[in-house]
Image (tube, helix red, strand yellow):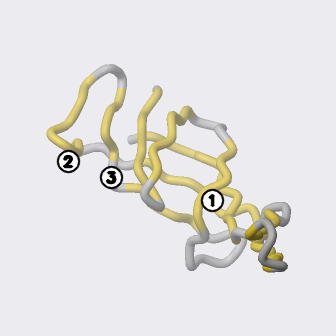
């Protein structure tokens, strides 16, 4: 069974066994999470969500993505600023689509 879910302001196309890197979720590793914002399942779309479909997954780990460097400068003005950012993520494995 295939589905499209929404979490963290993004949409993901999932099947059973899919491993996702999503925006950080407050759940411990090994804990089960439920995604109830299902946009599509087996070709049936919702308006905007399907009500009787539930996608369950398990949190594998938490982490941070690679650093993104932000560099600003104005030419001829001797203005330079460097800043870095590491986005936190949660690795989730999809177990069932009901």
Residue that carries the numbered disc 1 in the rendered image: 58
Residue at the outermost top position:
43
Tell me which corner region of the image, top left, top right, bottom left or bottom right, holds residue 36: bottom left
Q: Say if mark 2 contacts mark 3, CB within 8 Å.
A: no
Tell me which corner region of the image, top left, top right, bottom left or bottom right, holds residue 30: bottom right
Residue that carries the numbered disc 3 in the rendered image: 37
Figure quadrant of the C terminus: top left
**C-alpha distance separating marks 3 and 1:** 16 Å
Q: Is residue 35 visible?
A: yes
Give the image location of residue 57, x and y in percent: 56, 54
Disc 3, SS: loop
Q: Is residue 17 above or below residue 34?
A: above
Give the image location of residue 81, x and y in percent: 80, 79
Q: Residue at x 50, y 41 (%)?
A: 12
Q: Which mark is residue 51?
A: 2
Give the image location of residue 8, x and y in percent: 47, 61
Q: Earlier in the sequence, mark 3 or mark 1?
A: 3
Q: Residue at x 75, y 73 (%)?
A: 85
Disc 2, SS: loop
Depth check, front residue: 48 or 27: 48
Depth check, front residue: 12 or 15: 12
Q: Residues within 10 Å of mark 2 (few under 14, many from 20)?
A: few
Give the image location of residue 64, x and y in percent: 78, 69
Q: Residue at x 67, y 53 (%)?
A: 21
Residue at the outermost left position:
47
């Amino acid at each position: 069974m295939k589905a499209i879910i929404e979490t963290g302001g993004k949409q993901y196309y999932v099947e059973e066994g899919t491993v996702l890197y999503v925006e950080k979720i407050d759940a411990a590793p090994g804990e089960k999470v439920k995604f109830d914002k299902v946009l599509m399942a087996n070709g049936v779309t919702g308006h905007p969500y399907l009500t009787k479909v539930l996608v369950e997954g398990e949190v594998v780990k938490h982490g941070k993505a690679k650093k993104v460097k932000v560099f600003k400068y104005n030419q001829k003005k001797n203005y330079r600023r460097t800043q870095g950012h590491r986005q936190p993520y949660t690795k989730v494995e999809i177990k069932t689509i009901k």
